[in-house]
């Protein structure tokens, strides 16, 4: 079984029986295009898929809400007059990304 993953979702699962592959032609075209242009990935098993995509779910749970991020950006601009990589918003985002690093070879 192979899994195609793009934009945080499993687009389809391809079941391979002996030497036959049962996949809709449209799905195969989407997968080949997306893999070649870097927007998707094919995985040979579900464990590899879950490992590669787990960091996104972990980050999603830890990032501040959009409202909190906008409030942080607003206050940073009002207080300092600019946004910098050492500001509170950037540091909060960096902390989440550092705690949940993207696996090597992940799209």
Image (tube, rainbow, N blue to C red):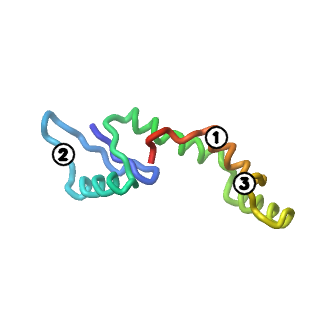
The answer for how far apart the CA atoms under marks 3 and 1 are is 14 Å
First in sequence: mark 3 vs mark 1: 3
Front: mark 3 or 2: 3
Q: Are marks 3 and 2 in contact (CB under 8 Å)?
A: no
The answer for how far apart the CA atoms under marks 3 and 2 are is 49 Å
Q: Position of residue 89 (x, y in %)?
A: 74, 54
Q: What residue does disc 3 label?
A: 85
73 shown above or below 4: below
First in sequence: mark 2 vs mark 1: 2
Density class for disc 2 (Cα within 10 Å; few <14, some 14-19, many ≥20) is few
The answer for how far apart the CA atoms under marks 2 and 1 are is 40 Å
Indicate left or right for 28 with 82 as reference.
left
Which of the labelled discs sits on residue 14, or is there none?
none
- Local secondary structure at mark 2: strand
Q: Residue at x 26, y 55 (%)?
A: 27
Which residue occupies the foreground of this view, 25 or 73? Answer: 73
Q: Residue at x 28, y 53 (%)?
A: 32
Front: mark 2 or 1: 1
Q: What residue does disc 1 label?
A: 98
- Local secondary structure at mark 1: helix
Q: Position of residue 2 (x, y in %)?
A: 29, 40
Q: What residue does disc 2 label?
A: 22
- Local secondary structure at mark 3: loop
Indicate left or right for 99 with 6 as reference.
right
Q: Position of residue 93 (x, y in %)?
A: 68, 49
Which residue occupies the foreground of this view, 64 or 38? Answer: 38
Quarter of the image for residue 15 reads top left
For this orientation, the residue located farthest to the right is 79
Q: Residue at x 34, y 47 (%)?
A: 4
18 shown above or below 90: above
């Amino acid at each position: 079984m192979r899994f195609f993953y793009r934009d945080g979702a499993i687009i389809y699962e391809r079941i391979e029986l002996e030497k036959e592959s049962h996949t809709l032609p449209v799905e195969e075209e989407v997968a080949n295009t997306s893999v070649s242009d870097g927007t998707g990935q094919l995985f040979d098993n579900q464990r590899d898929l879950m490992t590669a995509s787990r960091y996104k779910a972990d980050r999603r749970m830890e990032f501040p809400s959009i409202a909190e991020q906008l409030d942080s950006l607003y206050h940073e601009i009002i207080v300092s007059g600019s946004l910098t990589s050492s500001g509170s918003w950037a540091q909060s985002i960096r902390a989440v990304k550092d705690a949940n690093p993207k696996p090597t070879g992940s799209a």
